[in-house]
Amino acid sequence: MTTSSSPSHWTPAGFEEEALSARFTDLHPALGKRQAIIESARCLYCYDAPCIKACPTSIDIPTFIRRIHDDNLEGAASEILDANILGGSCARVCPTEILCEQSCVRNQGDECQPVLIGLLQRHALDNAKFESHPFTRAAHTGRRVAVVGAGPAGLSCAHRLARFGHDVVIFEAEEKAGGLNEYGIARYKLTDDFAAREVEFLLEIGGIEIRHGQRLGDNLAIAELTREFDSVFLGLGLGTSHSLGLTGEDAPGLMAATDYIKVLRQSSELNVLAVPKHAVVIGAGNTAIDIAVQVKRLGAESVDLVYRRGEAQMSATPHEQDIARANGVMIHTWARPLAIDSNTDGQLSAMQFARTRVEDGRLIDSGETFSLACDGVFTAIGQGFDDASLSDVHAAGMARSGAKIEVDTMLRTSLPGVYAGGDCIARGQDLTVQAVAHGKLAAEAIHHDLMLKVEAA
Amino acid sequence: MTIHTPLNEDNARPAGAGANDAASNDHVASYKADLSINFAGIRSPNPFWLASAPPTDKAYNVVRAFEAGWGGVVWKTLGEDPAAVNVSSRYSAHYGPNGEVSGFNNIELITDRSLEINLREITQVKKDWPDRALIVSLMVPCEEEAWKTILPQVEATGCDGIELNFGCPHGMPERGMGAAVGQVPEYVEKVTRWCKTYSSLPVIVKLTPNITDVRLPAQAALRGGADAVSLINTINSITHLDLDRMVAHPVVGGRSTHGGYCGSAVKPIALNMVSEIARTPETANLPISGIGGISNWEDAAEFIALGAGSVQVCTAAMLHGFRIVEEMKDGLGRWMDSKGYQKIDDFTRAAIPNTTDWKHLDMNYQVIARIDQDKCIGCGRCYIACEDTSHQAIMHLAKDNGTARYEVKDADCVGCNLCEITCPVDNCITMEEQDTGKPYMNWMEDPRNPHRAA
């Protein structure tokens, strides 16, 4: 493992690259043409379709599915992309079981199962053949907008702004654009270089420049952006991971799940990745599931996922929990981390837990404890807003809601001309599709506000 | 439970086996009803015959069909030598949303084998399968001599009857045969009379649907002495195009031609035509062999209830093989048992008294749609159909959880059934009869009728 966070006591699990790669292909394989035709015929083409309302980006699902069935894949893909320019990654990473597919009318009564909307969306986007980028830019407005963060929110915002005829510069801290699609989503959900290809496609619209190595609060300040640009959109994401708050948290072998996933996603050779033999994952969200499953697939002998409450309270969907179990991950509920044990070499050796229960609505220790021997612990107990990004004087005046940025219904921050969306705002939901929706909405607000100024001038 | 045994020599029905299919020896008894029929003097162990078409082209197929349990076959149309010659690329289909074939189109002509071979095979097959109905379809030019020549040869085979192919809509009419005869009642009558003159066999006249009023050729056939009619033959059709090559299917060397349409898509047209003949007093007693998209026992029961004494099947067999007849017999037999029908005649024409002209319908009858909210899945199809294209009689209401609730506005519902048709859930929308308290009143009695006789 090439990262500095790789503890010396971890080694690659010793599998052939071919065998490992096979474990990181699509978790849900794409539909074939025949499957897509059969599945699309199941869609009832509902009026006032509940699936559309359940999609944060309001994709007109019945319409695109009808077009798939009518062998009009380009029409289907255009319909999807018009609502959600990152429809390809959303088709792969959305928890459809709690969004569109949950609300599908065929999820009720005797209808067997919901229409496989996510897989159909992927089918349309994977197979549509566009001669050129399917969207064009409106007449050049002469306005310039800065977008901070090339994640789903920023990219979505930039594309929509470009369509409106504005010029966009995206400031991105990392080497690659894509945000969590590139660095944070499980490798078997976004395979190959899909995230990069999707960004490439998005940029085909023109009028979007990406400047890498630009980190807000480091070599970039809001004051400077508001001076140079007509509007600013902040799609900063969440830059820090919550820590356990225990003594010895810097022990080699304990790290944030997101740090390891980032390395895993960027690795071109999985067989050289160092992996713990016995891993413990703390958390109950999709990131916890993602790290647990991926570490298991990389060759860890055991992976134990521990959550302080019960299965019903886990934010990972039952579908995600099933994936973890199917991959041999042991899920322990009602236990909270108590202490970190290290061996004489200072390496992580075990994690101690206190059993918990709810009493009078409060979570308390039951008095019982247990220990899990492990040489690796991954924390996935949530991420936080990185305060450093808003440390300049101008940014410091921005209203916050808790740690996150406060915005109005049109995603305007308290600073004039500055908008924000995605995970960094108070109503962020930790969903790619939500971030895309914010980016789109912010672009519409920015365009509206800029055009008002034009009219007023 | 029906045990469907594979076809081999051991289980081929021996010659002279019993004439009734019910509880026969080659499968476990499943129903008590007697499916056997006597159609215009032609006996058959069940009402399911294979229509004159590729499945009855030669002895090999027909024997397989009899082994599979078909009650009879109409041997593919014989003609004068030299035999017809077919093109390559002959069929095309109209598909439903799941890729299932709803309609089938062909441009094949009559038999492309010599008369002598066909007659020899017919003779042998009838000898080996005496209990099955074997009818020979014929098409020769509209000249007395031609019929006078072929009829004795056909009769010599021992077959049970002949069917006159006056319906083939493609290819043959260009040569003055098939539908070119069937569309002119005078020709129908004339040729039928020749057949009755030069043959002692029962004569079934097969009618073309490519005509304005199917009752006219049926009446002509009766005047000519026909023992029965069969209908419908196929409908002129073009199923679909290759839009890249700008040519219809089936494509023959870059060109195409219209074909004859059959399969389940034509069933409604055939049912109506059968009923029209059955409920016309003049032809009410003329036996009818029903043809047109019969795919299962229920279709067959419907044809019989509207006047058919036997049914002919082709497309279903072409799509699924001969084994489909087992499903048809089993389903029909069990249904008959459930209704207390002991034989086919018990429900033949049972729906005819209830099939009438519009003017006899009750103007005071009223149904209103009811939506079962427990079954409703909220797809909104009933709403948009009614709102856009019908009577705006369904309300679109928001439920507390953000989903929609659909309710019928009784006062605006005219009882058109559109919502019931669009609803994907079984018995979620039902059309409920209203007690209007008013007596039967037809349009001729209705004061709103400006032409009402005082």
Image: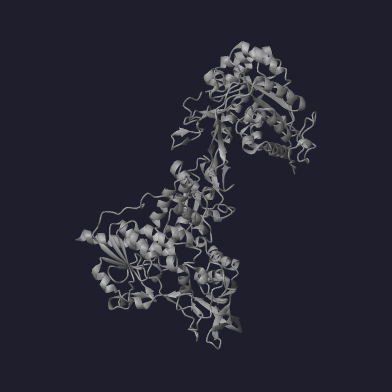
**As drawn, B395 above or below A447:** above
Q: Front-most of B379 and B362?
A: B379
Name the residue nearer the viewer: A300 or B167: A300
Q: How is the image coloured?
A: one colour
Q: Residue furthest left?
A: A457
Q: How many marks?
A: 0
Q: Quadrant of residue A292?
A: bottom right
Image x and y of residue A81, in percent: 40, 55
Q: Residue B307: x percent and y percent?
A: 65, 28
Q: Going by the picture, which residue comes out furthest to the top? A: B145
User: Which residue is more in the foreground, B417 or B185?
Assistant: B185
Q: Residue at x 56, y 34 (%)?
A: B104
Q: Quadrant of residue A207?
A: bottom left
Q: Quadrant of residue A318?
A: bottom right
Report x, y in % for residue B316.
Answer: 63, 36
Residue B287, compared with residue A67, is above or below; it is: above
Query: In the image, is A234 to the left or to the right of A48?
Result: left
Q: Is residue B22 visible?
A: no
